[in-house]
Image (cartoon, rainbow, N blue to C red):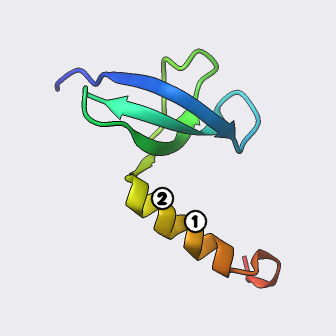
């Protein structure tokens, strides 16, 4: 299995607490263009869980989707 390389370009925020924190960052994976990335990380950013990445256009559409929702009325 090939080694995975990553560079956190900017930390945007954390949406979780605990030993592993769910974070929103801008990350370049394997020297490719950076994307918005959401996943859990250990405190040293050496280990991570599976996550999801978004291009700028995908992030804009996701933002529009969340802005259109009334989260207080969703059954969850």
Q: Nearer the viewer, residue 27 or 48?
A: 27
**Counting other residues with Cα less than 10 Å from the Cα at mark 1, is it few (<14), some (14-19), or many (20 or more)?**
few
What is the number of callouts on the image? Answer: 2
**Counting other residues with Cα less than 10 Å from the Cα at mark 2, is it few (<14), some (14-19), or many (20 or more)?**
some
- Which quadrant: the C terminus? bottom right
Taking the image as shown, residue 38 lies to the left or right of residue 16, namely left
The residues tagged by marks 2 and 1 sit, at their Cα atoms, a distance apart of 6 Å
Instruction: Residue 9 in the image: state x and y as whole percent.
Output: 47, 26
Q: Is residue 6 above or below residue 61?
A: above
Q: Residue at x 25, y 27 (%)?
A: 30
- Which quadrant: the N terminus? top left
Q: Quadrant of residue 34?
A: top left
Q: Residue at x 72, y 42 (%)?
A: 16
Taking the image as shown, residue 24 lies to the left or right of residue 31, namely right
Q: Quadrant of residue 35?
A: top left
Taking the image as shown, residue 71 lies to the left or right of residue 8, namely right
Residue linked to disc 2: 59
Instruction: Residue 69 in the image: state x and y as whole percent.
Output: 68, 80
Q: Residue at x 36, y 24 (%)?
A: 6
Badge 2 element = helix
Q: Residue at x 67, y 38 (%)?
A: 13
Taking the image as shown, residue 52 lies to the left or right of residue 45, namely left
Residue linked to disc 1: 63
Badge 1 element = helix
Q: Is residue 14 above or below residue 62?
A: above
């Amino acid at each position: 299995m090939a080694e995975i390389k990553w560079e956190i370009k900017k930390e945007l925020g954390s949406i979780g607490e605990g030993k592993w924190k769910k974070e929103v960052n801008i990350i370049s994976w394997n020297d490719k263009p950076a994307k918005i990335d959401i996943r859990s990380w250990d405190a040293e950013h050496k280990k991570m869980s599976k996550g999801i990445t978004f291009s700028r256009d995908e992030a804009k559409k996701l933002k529009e989707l969340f802005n259109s929702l009334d989260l207080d009325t969703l059954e969850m």
